Image (spheres, grey):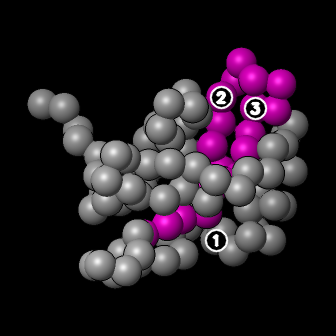
């Protein structure tokens, strides 16, 4: 069975974000879905080993088409990513 992502999905460790090929390694939910008003969103650290900046801290939003990312802070190390994650409200 295929896991269908939509605006009601909850972001979890191990999820892929959109078509970026990046995997969620940490996430903190910052906003709930409000029907007819807004989508749920998280601050997340995502990873892809083959990239120059293997870590990125994104705002990830659960949209009807699945998870999308915006407002990225790209990092060379996990330590740098954790610092940014904490500054942006990750826990």
Name the N-terminal-most of marks 2 and 1. Answer: 2
Query: Where is 26 relative to 91, above or below?
Result: above
Q: Which residue is mark 1?
A: 91
Any part of residue 78 in sight: no
Residue 42: give x, y in percent of width and height. Answer: 54, 64
Q: Where is residue 53, by image quadrant?
A: top right
Q: Which residue is mark 3?
A: 54
Name the N-terminal-most of marks 1 and 3. Answer: 3
What's the distance in space between the residues labelled 2 and 3, CA to CA? 5 Å
Instruction: Tell which of 26 and 60 is nearer to you.
Output: 60
Assess whether mark 3 and mark 2 are in contact (beta carbons under 8 angstroms): yes
Q: Residues within 10 Å of mark 2 (few under 14, many from 20)?
A: some
What's the distance in space between the residues labelled 2 and 1, CA to CA? 21 Å
Going 41% across and 75% down the picture, which residue do you hit?
38
Please state if 44 lies on the left or on the right of 62 as rendered.
right
Residue 13: give x, y in percent of width and height. Answer: 47, 48
Confirm whether the magenta stretch covers residue 16. Answer: no
Q: Secondary structure at mark 3?
A: loop
Please state if 56 lies on the left or on the right of 64 as rendered.
right
Please state if 78 lies on the left or on the right of 21 as rendered.
right
Name the N-terminal-most of marks 2 and 3. Answer: 2
Q: Secondary structure at mark 1?
A: loop
Q: Where is residue 58, by image quadrant?
A: bottom right
Which region shows up in magenta? 40-58
Assess whether mark 3 and mark 1 are in contact (beta carbons under 8 angstroms): no
Q: Which residue is mark 2?
A: 48
Q: Secondary structure at mark 2?
A: loop
């Amino acid at each position: 069975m295929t896991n269908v992502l939509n605006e009601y999905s909850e972001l979890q460790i191990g999820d892929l974000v959109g078509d970026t090929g990046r995997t969620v390694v940490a996430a903190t939910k910052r906003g709930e879905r409000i029907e007819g008003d807004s989508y749920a969103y998280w601050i997340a650290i995502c990873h892809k080993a083959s990239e120059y900046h293997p870590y990125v801290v994104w705002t990830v939003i659960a949209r009807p088409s699945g998870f999308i990312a915006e407002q990225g802070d790209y990092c060379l190390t996990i330590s740098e990513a954790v610092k940014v994650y904490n500054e942006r409200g990750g826990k």
